[in-house]
Amino acid sequence: MSNLINAIRGMNDLLPSETALWQSVEQTLRDTLSTFGYQEIRLPILEKTEVFERAIGKATDIVEKEMYTFLDRNNESLTLRPEGTASCVRAGIEHGLFYNQVQRLWYMGPHFRYERPQKGRYRQFYQCGAEAVGLEGPDIDAELILLSAKILDKLGLTPYVTLQLNSLGSSVARLTYRELLVNYFIQNQNQLDEDSQRRLMTNPLRILDSKNPDMQKLIANAPTLIDHLDLESAEHFGKLQTYLTSAELPYKINPYLVRGLDYYSRTVFEWVTTELGAQGTVCAGGRYDGLVEQLGGKRTPALGFAMGLERILLMVQQVAKKSMINKPDVYFITEGEDALKLAFKLADTVRNGMPKLRVILHCGGGSLKNQFKKADKSGAEVVLILGEQELKEKKISLKLLRKSMPQVSILQDDLIKYLYAREEFRDIC
Ligand code: HAM
């Protein structure tokens, strides 16, 4: 037994009982990204360490203490990607994708950070990221945020997430603000915790992100960046808000949202939830207009976001237990051998006519009453009933299980037409 080798801490096996849900969520992501015109880019899991050091910033937690970095056999320093934006920009520059072009790209896969594992925080975690390169915004900022909202909506998570928004302004405005902030914290240095003392000179904006309860009063009284934006960034941010409001997407301005990576400028946003405890950010991103240049390309505006798939999956499991993943839409019950024989065909007609509906044909016999109970327990919206009477009349009965509506009997030939005419099904199809 002592010879057993376990997985590395914070790196999860995904077992067969879990993969169906993963596949379903991944498919929703791919489909939605595609409907917004985003194309997949597949990137290496390893990059030269310099890619991340230059992009994310040497004074960030990720680069300082969370990267899996090692020397290869050729003594070159390589790093397992801790995030996707740096790799995506590196690849775009290398292959000339950004040269006078607009790109809408997405990627999905494992990323690696040496963090303390806990619920929703792992050392290998999956991200799905989207990056829009070549547009100044703020229209693309709104469109990208609406894309993230659409994905969350398709996953049934809208009621459980809040959009937080901030602007970090231009790099020049941020420098001026940085000075102001450092002065403020120096004046109150005795109230800074150890972590913040350290950040004061390296990355003072990150102090605003501190979760230490003892620091909250100090942070609340600090000058905010949003009050010190340059004119252009303020206009950009104002317009973005107008677009989101007219698209009826609610948001909250969070002046303390600064993000943990150095490449951001102007718009930053996070989708947060209270459903997951401490690790409540399920999606995060923003604009990084300086990054392409920083990695050796021509100055190119860009922005993007990434979702943490474990957190998304946890939420889907936790708050959307009744989600479409496990429950059928239609449960088909029958009475007698002849009805069962015809039901195989009819169930398939429904599957072919409405390919996204999940149709379970009851197997294992039993009385209609018992089958009806099973239908109800399955969570299905609809039960289709093919009894002896229906069989004789070439009809099929249909009852909505979750809404009060009398049972209806329709011609078998009209079944698909009938389902299409009802809003409940049109939504799923
Ligand atoms: P990030 O905020 O570092 O941003 O990560 C994005 C999301 O990945 C987080 O909101 C979270 O859901 C998930 N995540 C991060 N670390 C972990 C972890 N250790 N365990 C589980 N989930 C985690 C970025 O990575 C940027 N590249 C996002 C971006 C794309 N900005 C512009 N384009």
Image: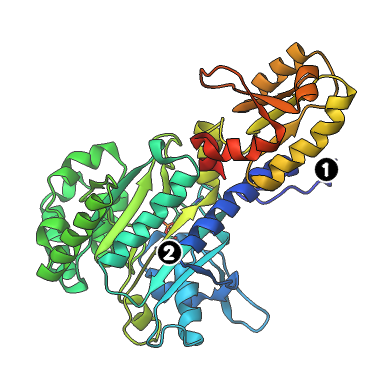
Residue at image position (55%, 51%) is 28
How far across and how far down the image is residue 174, in percent? 18, 67
- Which is nearer the N-term, disc 2 or disc 1? 1
Kindly give the residue lying farthest to the right in the view shown. 337
Looking at the rendered structure, which numbered label has been put on residue 2? 1
Residue 379 appearing in the image: yes
**What amino acid is labelled 2 in the image?**
Glu
Q: Quadrant of residue 263?
A: bottom left
Q: Nearer the viewer, residue 59 or 381?
A: 381
Q: Which residue is mark 2?
A: 64
Quote the CA–CA distance across marks 2 and 1. Answer: 35 Å
Quarter of the displayed picture in which ligand 1 can be seen: bottom left
How far across and how far down the image is residue 233, in percent? 17, 67
Q: Nearer the viewer, residue 305 or 408?
A: 408
**CB atoms of marks 2 and 1 within 8 Å:** no
Q: Quadrant of residue 173?
A: bottom left
Q: Quadrant of residue 234?
A: bottom left
Vertical arrangement, residue 9 with respect to residue 335, above or below: below
Q: Along the horizontal axis of the image, is 262 left or right of 130?
A: left
How crowded pointer 2 is (Cα within 10 Å; few <14, some 14-19, many 20+) is rated as few
Q: Along the horizontal axis of the image, is 68 left or right of 343?
A: left
How crowded pointer 1 is (Cα within 10 Å; few <14, some 14-19, many 20+) is rated as few
SS for dot 1: loop
Q: Along the horizontal axis of the image, is 82 left or right of 394?
A: left
How far across and how far down the image is residue 131, in percent? 43, 68
Residue at image position (56%, 30%) is 322
Residue at image position (64%, 43%) is 21
SS for dot 2: helix
**What amino acid is labelled 1 in the image?**
Ser
How far across and how far down the image is residue 378, in percent? 67, 25
